[in-house]
Image: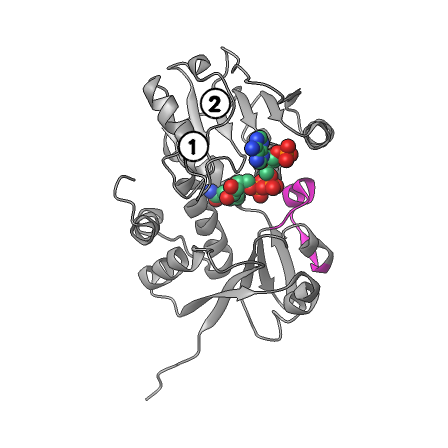
Amino acid sequence: MGKSYREELVGVFGYPVDENPTVVVAQTAFEDLQVPYRYLTVEVRPEDLKDAIRALPAWNMKGIHLTIPHKVEVLKYLDHVAEDAKIMGAVNTVYVKDGKLYGENTDGKGFIKSLVNADIALEGKKVFMLGAGGAARAIAVELANAGAKELIILNRSRARGEELKALLEEHTKLQVEYREWDHTMPIDEDTDILVNTTSIGLYPEVDAKPDIVFDTILPHMVVCDVIPNHPHTQLLKEAEKRNAKTIDGLGMLINQAVESIRMWTGKTADAEKMKNALAKEYGIADV
Ligand code: NDP
């Protein structure tokens, strides 16, 4: 008697969304926190996004994650968007409060947290970033918020690279330089942090490597990758060979989910348990 069967609903909208593994880490967190939350993996077509988002309060849902292709489009349908998400032009987390829709972007915050957890300071640092897409935008804005000083953007498409440079110069204090990625590029010797934000190396292309001079990676550098599957990328292997410290993309994925779960539940989930659940799901023993 008195038992409640009702669940608080959250989840992810995407298209395609079948292979999104966030449900595994989210349900692990909810069980561990002992909260009656259910994470739904929902296929929402682009033309249905407006209806799907506007229905969140009617379903009394706590919020939702957005993934490809909805992160930019969703901004139109929200009541409030956080300042940094506005600069990024992308939202990956929505939470519902008093019937209103609030948008945030936790991707970059998740990346920064994975550096902080590894005791890597960002204040005054020079970052060399491969890529200028959605993940790059989120990471670059949060690097600026965390006090990084200088950012080199290496990107194949000039338009995208220059657009990101202009956006960062307008809204942040970062010193930014764009370089066109049209040949095998060296990494500047005074780089503190090298980060791959491109999709190079993402499953099933696990043998792909970014077109850089690997011998310009030096032992004082921290080399990071956003690729979550498989997390032990060729770039990280090359960096390990040159005695650089490495940070994989699982930390970012888990930490962005921890941030979103805090927005939905008010509680802080155990990142280590979530990471273990995901590693088990991927059949990865060496993380
Ligand atoms: P986008 O499509 O927005 O951007 C892709 C970027 O990769 C662009 O800069 C593109 O360059 C570059 N790129 C792709 N292929 C190549 C190539 N062969 N050579 C050089 N550059 C290339 O994607 P996202 O930013 O949304 O996602 C990028 C990656 O980040 C994905 O693999 C995703 O899984 C991962 N990610 C991981 C997260 C995590 O939590 N770990 C969170 C979010 C994303 P160009 O502009 O020239 O096309």
Q: Is residue 145 visible?
A: no
The residue shown at (50%, 35%) is 200
Q: Are marks 1 and 2 in contact (CB under 8 Å)?
A: yes
The residue shown at (44%, 74%) is 7
Which amino acid lies under the numbered mark 2 shown in the image of this protein?
Ile
| Vertical order, 85 against 41 (above or below) | above
Q: Which residue is mark 1?
A: 115
Quarter containing the C terminus: top left
**In the image, is residue 237 part of the stretch drawn in magenta?**
no
Secondary element at image label 2: strand
**In the image, is residue 85 part of the stretch drawn in magenta?**
yes
Closer mark to the observer between disc 1 and disc 2: 2
Camera-nearest residue between 1 and 151: 151
Please tell me which of labels 1 and 2 falls first in the chain: 1
The residue shown at (44%, 25%) is 121
Secondary element at image label 1: helix
- The x and y percentages for residue 96 are 59, 63
Q: Which residue is mark 2?
A: 193
Picture quadrant of ligand 1: top right
Indicate how the structure is coloured in the image: one colour
The CA distance from mark 1 to mark 2 is 10 Å
- The x and y percentages for residue 36 are 39, 70
Which segment did they paint magenta?
Answer: 77-91
Which amino acid lies under the numbered mark 1 shown in the image of this protein?
Leu
Instruction: Tell me if 157 is positioned left or right of 61 in this view.
Output: right
| Vertical order, 179 against 68 (above or below) | above
* Res. 231 mark: none
Instruction: Tell me if 1 is positioned left or right of 89 in this view.
Output: left
The residue shown at (46%, 58%) is 266
Camera-nearest residue between 259 and 19: 19
